[in-house]
């Protein structure tokens, strides 16, 4: 298996885990200290909706990874897929900073390394 394909599959596994986590948050699980700045144990309705929306975004992010690794058809075309991979690399890179400065220690400890790994995986995909 090629490095880009392995990176895409690992990214999909992490994104699936994050989607399950966001579904739990949207359903009212008391895990809010790990997300959205960590200001709530149980998320208020607005953030629960945002968690539900993030699940759809994670699916798009995963599809982008698969398309970049040629494990799925490209997004519109190869150029769009390549640009999307770079945008997601930057997005996850920003996530390292945002989670790293969170007021919530649990969020810093769990989500910062998670987005660090996603950044590395999408960088590998972007460079291939």
Image (cartoon, rainbow, N blue to C red):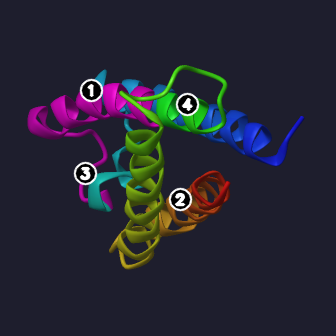
Residue under the point 65% across and 54% down: 121
Q: Earlier in the sequence, mark 3 or mark 2?
A: 3
Task: Give the image quarter of residue 2.
Answer: top right
Question: Looking at this view, is 95 or 5 the one in front?
Answer: 5
- The residue tagged with tag 2: helix, strand or loop? helix
- 12 in the magenta segment: no
Q: 96 or 3: nearer the eye?
A: 3
For label 1, the residue is 52
Q: Is residue 16 above or below residue 95?
A: above
Compute the Cα span from label 1 to label 3: 16 Å
Q: Which residue is mark 3?
A: 40
Q: Nearer the viewer, residue 41 or 76?
A: 76
Q: Residue furthest right?
A: 1
Circle 1 or circle 4, nearest the eye: 4
The answer to the question of whether label 2 and label 1 lie on touching residues, with beta carbons closer than 8 A, is: no
Disc 1 to disc 3: CB gap under 8 Å: no
Q: Is residue 68 above or below residue 37?
A: above
Would residue 106 appear left or right of 46 to someone viewing this image? right
Q: Quadrant of residue 43?
A: top left
Figure check: 55 above or below 97: above
Disc nearer the start of the sequence (2/1)? 1
């Amino acid at each position: 298996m090629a490095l880009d394909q392995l990176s895409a599959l690992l990214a999909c596994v992490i994104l699936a885990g994050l989607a399950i986590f966001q579904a739990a948050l949207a359903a009212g699980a008391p895990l809010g200290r790990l997300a959205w700045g960590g200001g709530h144990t149980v998320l208020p309705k607005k953030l629960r909706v945002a968690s539900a929306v993030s699940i759809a975004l994670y699916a798009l992010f995963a599809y982008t990874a698969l398309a970049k690794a040629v494990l799925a058809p490209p997004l519109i075309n190869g150029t769009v897929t390549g640009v999307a991979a770079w945008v997601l690399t930057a997005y996850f890179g920003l996530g390292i900073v945002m989670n790293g400065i969170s007021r919530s220690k649990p969020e810093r400890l769990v989500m910062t390394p998670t987005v660090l790994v996603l950044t590395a995986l999408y960088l590998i995909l972007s460079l291939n």
